[in-house]
Amino acid sequence: MVMILPMPHALIRLNARALIFAATLLLIISGSKPSFCAQPGGAGFIFLEEPLNARSIGMGSAGTAAAGGGFAYYNPSLIAFAPPALTCVEYGQMPQDFSQTHLESAWHLGNNFSGGVDWHLYSIGNIIPADEQGPLQNLTGSSQDTRVSLLAAYTFHRVALGLAINGMQEQIFTSTAYGVSLSAGAATAFLNDKLRVGVAAFHEGYATSYLTFPRDWERYRMPRSARAGAAYRDSLSAVAFTIAADGVYRDEDERFMLPVGLEIKPLPYIALRLGKRFNDDTQVFSCGIGIMVAPLTVDCSFVKAQLVNDSELHWLVGLTYALPRP
């Protein structure tokens, strides 16, 4: 029996089937090895879990379907929904000499292909080591985590499939570990691009230990995660808004989180943001602001964090250059 449907319904059905297939494939990939298992000298790359992109962070880090940036962290396929050419540089700080620098660029390569590159650096200064006798005040050092990602996406019938190849290095004092991983994602749009949905899985790969030499590449220590989400954008009484929500599973501690966020634009060039990651172990809430003067956008985000009895404020500021769609 053959059924002939009007074109919009046929495309929606095709998008849904393609997205379900992509989600199933990602779940198979992300479940293809045992859970995280720490070993002596092997735990590391913890900053892979830290969110990127000031816009998304201001919205509670709900970025799996909202194409704002941080594609290597939220969903590699979203570069297909980004402006034709985008470049973003960000810098932020946390307490205790933590700082982060982030640079990413994405561009469209014809009608179906998109590419991108992402570079991210976390650094910690003035680390004082300790032994069984206590702190060694006369010896200080630093830690640096560096990640470089190459991204590619292919679009067909409004369904985007994306892939990211990640290389990373973590150095603490004079000890260094290396890692390589693969991330993948899928996204599609409905209702004239008002509603987007996406799924992604991150960091299936290999890493070295700090302590072994020559270095052995193992599959036991890469912190993995998977996420799915939706973002809806519209306007109410001439005020544009975006609502986003994600479900995130973190394999390292078997934690499920629910980031949610809201962005409203009371004026065409100002965006106000508020969000929260429910079931996160430290975050209380997040907020942010964006100022848009095309082709430039300045975004700032602030995260209120609570760790036991210590209250902290994390901030991140970013500058984005984006060419408008033709």
Image (cartoon, rainbow, N blue to C red):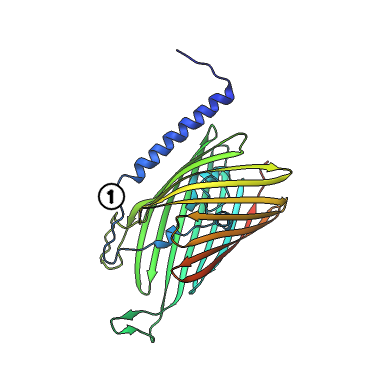
Choose top left, top right, bottom left or bottom right for residue 220.
bottom left
| Picture layout, residue 82 above or below residue 210 | above
| Picture layout, residue 198 above or below residue 11 | below
Residue shown at the point (55%, 57%) measured from the top left: 57
Where disc 1 sits, the SS reads loop
Left or right of 319? Residue 112 is left
Quadrant position of the C terminus in the picture: top right
Residue placed under numbered mark 1 in the picture: 34
Residue shown at the point (30%, 52%) measured from the top left: 35
- Percent x, y of residue 201: 41, 47
Choose top left, top right, bottom left or bottom right for residue 200.
top left
* Residue lying furthest front: 309
Callout count: 1
Choose top left, top right, bottom left or bottom right for residue 221.
bottom left
Quadrant position of the N terminus in the picture: top left
Q: Amino acid at mark 1?
A: Pro
- Percent x, y of residue 72: 48, 52
Left or right of 278? Residue 295 is right
Left or right of 125? Residue 270 is right
Residue shown at the point (50%, 65%) measured from the top left: 305
* Residue lying furthest top: 1
* Residue neighbourhood size for the residue with mark 1, other residues' Cα within 10 Å, grouped as few (<14), some (14–19), many (≥20): few
- Percent x, y of residue 239: 71, 46
Nearer to the camera, 252 or 148? 252
